[in-house]
Amino acid sequence: MTEDLERRLEDLTARVPEGRPDVAFVVTGGGRLKRRRAALGALASIAMIGVVAVGLIAIDLDLPRGFDPTAQTAAPTEHRSDPEKSPAVAPSNQPLEPGDLKAPPPVTVRFSDQSIDLHAWTYCYGNGCINGAPPDNPPEVGQPGEVIVEFPLSEWSFTASFSPAGEECGRIQQVPLKPTGDRKFLLRPAGYAGAYDVTLFGRGNGSLSTTFRWTTPTDGPLPNPKARLAVLANPDGDIDSYGVELEVTNLARTPRRASATVTVEASSGDALSFKVTRADGRCFPEGTVYWDGPDSEGLAAAELGNQPFTYKVELMLDGERYVASATWPDDEIAGNEPSVPLHFTPNLPLFRSSTMRS
């Protein structure tokens, strides 16, 4: 897929109304869709976009809240509390393959003496992409102390995102899975013990996301704050901007007051400073602050001169000042381009049990 087409798809994503935050995209013809803006909340609708010779065709399907396209043909599973139950593999859902798309193989999650096969609800694989939303009630694995994730394709890696089950705006923690050989990965609990919807994100010759529910019996590592900034992009060698985004996650708590000023300086020394626009009216995970825009300042920054560019950020959280800097494009986050990571001084407030656990 060309950069121009990717940008047109991102522009369509940005125009989805506030009340329709979750969108699914289907891209055919060998293209790869890179979603820049995260969809939050339960699935309210699915929009399918097919790439054809004459341009883009958009189909908007109004579906009930919580609709899970992978669950419509799911077979019933056996009750796990049956004491006579022998080791078995739970029946899997059917792959989500609209049109001519070919879904990736299922991800197998092994726990105790059982396993479940999970098909992706979002993927880029083979001849296209589909981008949906996780089911309201994903398959459950119970309370094992750890799980093993298996995937039949080589050279793939996996990350797990833990989100409190049933909490639409709960704190989210991401951890990498540890490879154990033979295309297997070990996953242990993260965060405080409790019920989580765990989304596995796989990346290799393509990408996929799939979700299961796990009631972790023990505490795991707690998250540290992270921050990223996106201002400039470099499609086809030309400096441009697809919008301004600043995101801080896993703070001790969501601040009541938050503001940020960004300075972009070109290699020539020409610079531009502006205040970023805090996004509101949407459900963000606890401990997350997100700024979106103004896009016009990003376009103005693209006219400053040549790369490399220096980003400087001054952050104010409930009256406390934090500063960070980064270099673009040198510091770009692999897999999340054109964002760069930000490391603030002093350190951002940590989420810890002594004062933060609820």
Image (spheres, grey):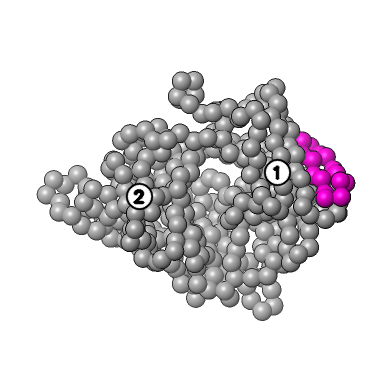
Q: Position of residue 280 (x, y in %)?
A: 66, 37
SS of the residue under disc 1? strand
Magenta span? 261-277
- Which-is-in-front pick, marks 1 and 2? 1
**Residue 17, visible in the rendered structure:** no
Look at the image and tell me in which quarter the N terminus lies. bottom right
Q: Position of residue 195 (x, y in %)?
A: 37, 38
Mark 1 surroundings: few (<14), some (14-19) or many (≥20) residues within 10 A: many
Q: Is residue 265 magenta?
A: yes
In this orientation, which residue lies closer to the viewer: 43 or 348? 348
Would residue 251 appear left or right of 311 to someone viewing this image? left
Residue to which mark 2 is pinned: 186
Q: Which mark is residue 326?
A: 1
Name the amino acid type tagged 2: Leu
* Residue 310, placed above or below residue 131: above
Q: Residue at x 64, y 55 (%)?
A: 337
Query: How far apart are the alpha carbons under marks 1 and 2?
Result: 33 Å
Q: Is residue 280 magenta?
A: no
Find residue 73 and report its image quarter: bottom left
